[in-house]
Amino acid sequence: MTISDTAAPTDAALDPREAELLARVPDGLFIGGVWEAGSAAPIEVKDPATGRVIKRIANAQPEDGIRALDAAAAAADAWAATPPRTRAEILRRAFDLLQERRDDFALLMTLEMGKPLAEANGEVTYGGEFLRWFSEEAVRIGGRYGRNPEGTGSMIVSQRPVGPCYLITPWNFPLAMATRKIAPALAAGCTVVVKPAELTPLTTLLFAQLLADAGVPAGVVNIVPTHNAGALSEPIIADPRLRKLSFTGSTPVGRRLLAQAGQNVLRTSMELGGNAPFIVFEDADIEKAVEGAMLAKFRNIGQACTAANRFLVHESVAEEFAARVTERVNALSLGRGTDDGVTIGPLIDDRAVASMSVLIGDAVDRGARILTGGKAPERDGCFFEPTVLIGVQPGSEILREEIFGPVLAISTFATEDEAVAGANETEYGLVGYVFTNDLARGQRMIDRIDTGMMGLNTGLVSNAAAPFGGVKQSGLGREGGAEGIHEYLSTKYTLIPAS
Ligand code: NAD
């Protein structure tokens, strides 16, 4: 693999285009349509490719969170009463503005999160689709009308916005995880308080500016980045004015938030961790499987909840699959995401780099072999070499933990039942990938694998028009698709007796 070291040294002047963009990113809290300076020590946002602080922004305190909820609560009735067509047109304008400002958003995500620029561009497309999709859904919120079975009255079933929502997003997809929540909430007529991840808050702040430019009224969207997510969130979640919590992040934090939400009987959506099986049968098109593996494993530097975590390959094709995938991995180019041709950026922080070494060390101690990579390269930044392991043994940590990095771990199986048992041997259930040319077998796998989503002969399933979400410890609820808006609506039934 190629390892470039063209990242700016930490004391060098910023590239002028980067400096100009960063200067335009708001650095305040966005509450009630006003940008506010924070009162506490600022959050320092770093470029993970260089370790350099690229911007200091306001750090919301618990009282700021409550003021943001005050603003969302004050704006709630007017926004709910805004005609769906108006809400739709505002969201559509936001979609159009995002296309116009695409280069800014892509570069900003690369700077604060590290993904290669081409992938950041892909996220602008994907994230933008939620604005377009939910602008279309806003005017299709239906209901039902009918006579009751006894014939004594009419039954009306209608949908109303659930009320003020608290949205918590992770760092790995700074734009798409925000639009996937904000767009359906606004389409449904809900106002929101958003808490972006402290590692990557800049994209959300720039997006707040875009929403205001698109015509979102003051108070409908409020943004409160903070260094202390727990202290800020607890009083918001406990506040009786809040009606919904939507969280994307790790399963342990999701469990804690569910317990807090239970005290206030909140509606919740939980998009949590994954541990996706990627199964290659002996009858699969191996080239297609390798292609799928590269996408499912190395997209976003392996830092996706949908990332393939466990490669289960039939024993008769495992060596061939491993050899071909290793060849592809050796052709990857590691470096700062802004550099031409880079396909693997840095991990998000030093902890993530250390975690790769621990997982690989444990797998090797239990009998796995490293085919390529296996260590952090000698250069600045939070980089880790894309790695392929073969012969990963049952009981290895890497099969249990969400890897969240560029490490492809291969185990083998002999029978279909063994593949199913291996795939389901996890507390998670977000997505599974199956490669086979036998349609009947593919359908059996779809039925038998316990996940919320499946890819058959593909390594990428996400689509704004599809319901995204998991089963088991991967979460509750769905984002996107026709289902996505219902997470922000509550059903009301009315009986009108025949007179
Ligand atoms: P994380 O759980 O550490 O943090 C997620 C968000 O929760 C951040 O904004 C963080 O500040 C906040 N948070 C942390 N502790 C909190 C607390 N006590 N109260 C309130 N908020 C708190 O996760 P992460 O490292 O940012 O993201 C990676 C995780 O997200 C992975 O597990 C990944 O699988 C998951 N993820 C899931 C999906 C999905 O749709 N299922 C999508 C992307 C990421």
Image: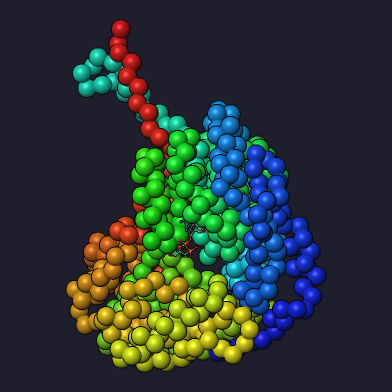
Residue furthest top in the image: 499
- Percent position (x, y) of residue 252? 38, 61
Viewer-closest of 222 and 105: 222
Please give the name of the residue rendered at 41% of the width and 91% of the height, measured from the top-left corner. Answer: 370
- Percent position (x, y) of residue 315? 27, 86
Location of residue 88 by image quarter: top right
- Percent position (x, y) of residue 289? 39, 78
Residue furthest front in the image: 40
Please give the name of the residue rendered at 45% of the width and 84% of the height, measured from the top-left corner. Answer: 357
Q: How is the image coloured?
A: rainbow
Please give the name of the residue rendered at 33% of the width and 90% of the height, measured from the top-left corner. Answer: 365
- The reply, left or right, for residue 45 in relation to residue 148 is right
- Percent position (x, y) of residue 306? 42, 66
Please give the name of the residue rendered at 28% of the width and 85% of the height, measured from the top-left corner. Answer: 393
**Above or below, 345 relative to 252:** below
Q: Name the image quarter holding the N terminus.
A: bottom right
Report if residue 140 is visible in the image: no
Report if residue 418 is visible in the image: yes
- The reply, left or right, for residue 284 in relation to residue 290 is left
